[in-house]
């Protein structure tokens, strides 16, 4: 389109200009009007910043650091070709690319899905690297690149450990069969012990009987995988134990990448929701002070990753039903069962919109935690409590339901004389819709962790319910392939 417009403009400039007065008889004298010359503005050329010049010793050190750190930071499944110290400019460019990948991830803006609502901060590694070369502190510069969080460090240690397991042959695949539980004996029990011992050093590998100690070992494994800790090996537990070691390595790498999308300084007072695990944690001074189960979006109605700030709590909120839910779910129910709206507290607004009035029936319960975001999601209470007892809690339309919303409301309003616990209870009991603004707004992060380390360093895994681990790996591989093609 731009080329066509330019051609039309150029053709118009080349046509002879016939003044209107020339069409009238007798012609009037024409005073020529000078046409200003077209000024061609040269493109702005940004000054090229020269690459820092490495000494021989620095080049050798940098080549070694690159080879080691690429694997340590989970940027490759297999060791890359060893960088050579001789091609120093190429070595420097490789170091800068490495720094961007470790510090801010490997995706471009166009690679992010809309519901991956986190974006890494812009990072230019050249000034810091040039300073490190000047002061001969390249190793310290490398060490400062990764996200400065214990969660990332735990994944890094886990990556090293699971790579070691893979290099040693991984773990055997357990054969299917009837559920295994206390009192069982035989070869399958022996194989189970050997499999559990790979990840759990407290499991004895000898013995063919499913004894009390093995029951506890199975329960520990089920907790690591987010399963109901029954102590019995049934279909779900068997499937989790049979995930290949290589898949666990890739899972850890995907979660390390998502850590790089966070700011370098997370607020010490914050709320974090692990979408995949369906758990909310409150941090005070960077220490967890409250945790509760949550219900997050089911596949197809994914809860987005995002960061925002909770600014207020709505007590006794009405539910303004999204059009998609009203059309797909509620209007059909009313059609099949006239009177459904009335019995469940729904009213029709302007002939099309639905609102469920505040009260015990409201899908939002008694509390709604508001924060600005582009996805119209929020944290909220719910009158449906049964799902919190489940170990699979991906069931919402995208918002996050909370197990203990009243406790969270009291914690966030603590210190506000207008909103003592008694005042909150009174407002709930009265039933009126009231907005309580936080005197100290709190940051909230909705994050997608399918692999994470516990405080003891033990790796925990969850299913990838949205398929985002695989999508992320595919996007990284595609971008790496494009960059390799350009570099040829």
Image (cartoon, helix red, strand yellow):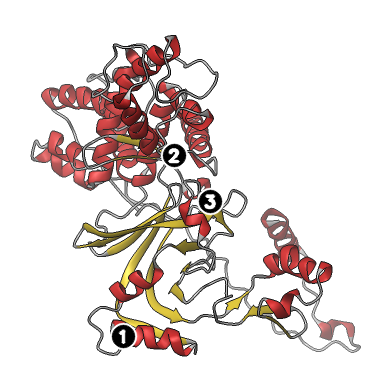
Q: How far apart are marks 1 and 3 (CA)?
A: 33 Å
> Looking at the image, is mark 2 or mark 3 nearer the viewer?
2
Q: Name the residue tied to disc 2.
A: 227
Q: Residue furthest left?
A: 135
Q: How far apart are marks 1 and 2 (CA)?
A: 38 Å
Up the image or down, 303 lies above or below 355; here it is above
Name the quadrant containing residue 263: bottom left
> Looking at the image, is mark 1 or mark 3 nearer the viewer?
1
Which callout, 2 or 3, points at the residue further toward the start of the chain? 2
Q: Name the residue tied to disc 1.
A: 422
Name the quadrant containing residue 186: top left
Please tell me whether mark 1 sits on a helix, a strand or a loop.
helix
Q: Name the residue tied to disc 3.
A: 394
Please give the label number shown on residue 107.
Answer: none
Can residue 53 be seen at all in this image of the molecule?
yes
Nearest the viewer among 336 and 376 is: 336
Residue 436 lies, in percent from the top left, at 38, 84
Residue 262 lies, in percent from the top left, at 34, 52
Please tell me whether mark 3 sits on a helix, a strand or a loop.
strand
Please tell me whether mark 2 sits on a helix, a strand or a loop.
loop
Residue 241 lies, in percent from the top left, at 44, 25
């Amino acid at each position: 389109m731009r080329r066509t417009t330019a051609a039309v403009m150029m053709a118009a400039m080349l046509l002879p200009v016939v003044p209107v007065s020339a069409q009238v008889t007798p012609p009037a004298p024409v005073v020529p009007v000078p046409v200003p010359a077209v000024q061609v503005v040269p493109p702005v050329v940004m000054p090229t910043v020269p690459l820092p010049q490495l000494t021989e010793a620095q080049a050798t050190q940098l080549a070694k650091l690159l080879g080691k750190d690429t694997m340590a930071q989970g940027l490759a499944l297999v060791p890359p070709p060893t960088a050579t110290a001789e091609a120093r400019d190429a070595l420097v460019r490789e170091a800068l690319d490495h720094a961007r990948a470790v510090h801010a991830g490997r995706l471009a803006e166009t690679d992010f899905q809309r519901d991956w609502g986190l974006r890494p901060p812009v990072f230019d590694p050249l000034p810091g690297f040039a300073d490190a070369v000047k002061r001969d502190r390249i190793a310290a510069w490398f060490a400062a690149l990764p996200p400065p969080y214990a969660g990332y460090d735990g994944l890094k240690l886990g990556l090293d450990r699971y790579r070691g397991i893979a290099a040693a042959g991984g773990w055997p695949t357990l054969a299917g069969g009837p559920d295994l539980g206390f009192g069982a004996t035989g070869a399958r029990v022996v194989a189970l012990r050997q499999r559990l011992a790979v990840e759990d050093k407290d499991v004895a590998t000898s013995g063919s009987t499913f004894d009390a100690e093995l029951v506890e070992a199975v329960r520990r494994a089920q907790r690591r995988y987010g399963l109901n800790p029954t102590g019995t090996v049934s279909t779900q537990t068997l499937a989790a134990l049979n995930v290949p070691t290589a898949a666990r390595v890739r899972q850890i790498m995907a979660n390390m990448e998502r850590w790089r999308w966070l700011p370098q300084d997370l607020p010490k007072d914050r709320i974090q929701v692990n979408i995949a695990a369906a758990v909310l944690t409150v941090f005070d001074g960077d220490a967890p002070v409250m945790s509760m189960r949550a219900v997050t979006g089911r596949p197809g109605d994914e809860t987005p990753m995002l960061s925002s700030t909770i600014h207020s709590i709505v007590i006794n909120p009405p539910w303004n039903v999204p059009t998609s839910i009203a059309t797909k779910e509620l209007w059909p129910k009313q059609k099949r069962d006239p009177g459904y709206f009335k019995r469940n507290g729904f009213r029709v607004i302007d002939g099309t919109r639905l609102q469920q009035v505040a009260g015990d029936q409201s899908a939002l319960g008694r509390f709604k935690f508001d924060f600005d975001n582009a996805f119209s999601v929020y944290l909220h209470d719910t009158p449906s409590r049964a799902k919190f007892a489940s170990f699979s809690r991906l069931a919402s339309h995208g918002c996050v339901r909370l197990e203990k919303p009243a406790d969270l409301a009291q914690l966030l309003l603590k210190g506000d004389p207008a909103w003592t616990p008694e005042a909150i209870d009174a407002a709930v009991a009265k039933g009126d819709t009231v907005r309580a603004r936080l005197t100290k707004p709190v940051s909230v992060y909705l994050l997608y962790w399918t692999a994470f380390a516990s405080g003891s360093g033990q790796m925990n895994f969850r299913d990838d319910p949205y398929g985002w681990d695989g999508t992320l790996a595919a996007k990284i591989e595609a971008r790496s392939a494009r960059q390799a093609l350009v570099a040829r």
